[in-house]
Amino acid sequence: MGMSQNLTLEQIRQAPKALLHDHLDGGLRPRTVVELAEAQGYTGLPTTDVAQLETWFRESADSGSLERYLETFTHTVGVMQSREALVRVAAECAEDLAADGVVYAEVRYAPEQHLEGGLTLDQVVEAVLEGFEQGRERAARAGNQIRIGTLLTAMRHAARSQEIAELAVRYRDAGVVGFDIAGAEAGYPPTRHLDAFEYLRRENFHFTIHAGEAFGLPSIWEALQWCGTDRLGHGVRIVDDIESSPSGGLRMGRLANYVRDKRIPLELCPSSNVQTGAADSIEKHPIGMLRRQRFRITVNTDNRLQSGTTMSEEFAKLCEAFGYGWDDLQWFTVNAMKSSFLPFDERLALINGHIKPGFAQLKWATE
Ligand SMILES: [Zn+2]
């Protein structure tokens, strides 16, 4: 029971899944990138052949070069500069996640990166919210129910975090459930945006911070103890505070203990972590140890286009590497729901009304 069931990708697709860390500009369909570039007169793409472009995205992300990895986002963001483009990308995002069996997703993007076509920050947010709603309706007609919560991201090298935080709060009753900061970690500590985080706390709003991906413990510590983050975006470098002794035991430092004691959610993204070098391979990803130590870990996609992945594929890779079965996948999923920025009663309704019955049925069917 629950062990080494060799779940297939098809079976995992049937499971009601939840994810908390997915970038809107990291999840476009390759064909959409090509079509939007043409519609907006964007001439910077490395190729307009859909299949070649798909390969190019993945190879650039795999290349080990941060420059090439970041170039992929220049193109996706480059074609997301009109209202129509934003509505379409958001609608397809909702459809694709729903078709993969995701019942709840928090999708994030940085409004400040979508102003080149003349849109205001408010217009960007409204276009994306409208796209999610259109996608949700189309998915429902296809028989797939999904709920999407939006997170607004501020870029950590820029100086608009207070403005973006206020924007997020302004749309809190329209589908924006949280705030985030992203971008290069080194040189841009989270405390640089302390005013924004203090504002959000006074507003009783939720936020997560990309921390502990490229950069280690100081970034995690600042995000938690100075900024008061609810969750850690990646947070995978918390393993730097956990030492294994020759006898096979583990010794955790004060920060690792704090993260585990306080049930701070870690938004782990296995494939992405391997591509950016935060983990050597899926098999060597610290998720195995962190799960055994019962940290509050969640599994996420980060950038589906660049990593050539889906939520189901991330789960399938973990099943293969660690022998996980339905019980593990349900545990990750319930962890994600418990850590989501939805109101408590709505989280419970999804857990008890969809997720647990869905997994129970799958366990029964595959026993
Ligand atoms: Zn991310």
Image: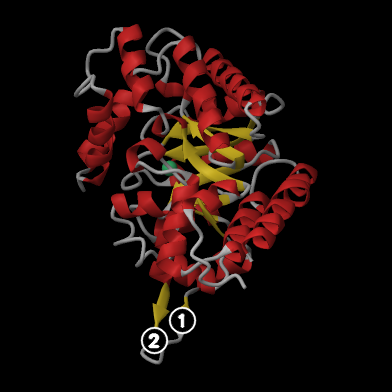
Residue kind at label 2, given as amino acid type? Ser
The image position of residue 216, as x and y in percent, is 37, 59
Between residue 304 and residue 179, name the one nearer to us: 304
Mark number, residue 245:
2
The relative height of residue 286 versus residue 235 in the rendered view (above or below) is below
Mark 2 Cα-neighbour bin, 10 Å: few <14, some 14–19, many ≥20: few
Residue located 28% across and 55% down the image: 277
The relative height of residue 103 versus residue 230 in the rendered view (above or below) is above
**Figure quadrant of the C terminus:** bottom right
SS at circle 1: strand
Between residue 221 and residue 289, name the one nearer to us: 289
Residue located 46% across and 28% down the image: 110
In the shown orientation, is residue 188 left or right of residue 206?
left
Mark number, residue 226:
none
User: Residue 303: which quarter of the image?
Assistant: top left
The number of discs equals 2
Residue located 19% across and 24% down the image: 46
Q: Examine the rendering and report whether any part of residue 193 can be seen.
A: no
**Figure quadrant of the N terminus:** bottom right
Earlier in the chain: of badge 1 and badge 2, it is 2
The image position of residue 279, as x and y in percent, is 33, 60
- Which quadrant of the picture is home to ligand 1? top left
In the shown orientation, is residue 94 left or right of residue 171?
left
The relative height of residue 126 versus residue 219 in the rendered view (above or below) is above
The image position of residue 85, as x and y in percent, is 44, 14
Residue located 28% across and 12% down the image: 42
- Compute the Cα span from label 1 to label 2: 7 Å
Mark number, residue 251:
1
Residue kind at label 1, given as amino acid type? Arg
SS at circle 2: loop
Pointers 1 and 2 in contact (CB under 8 A)?
yes
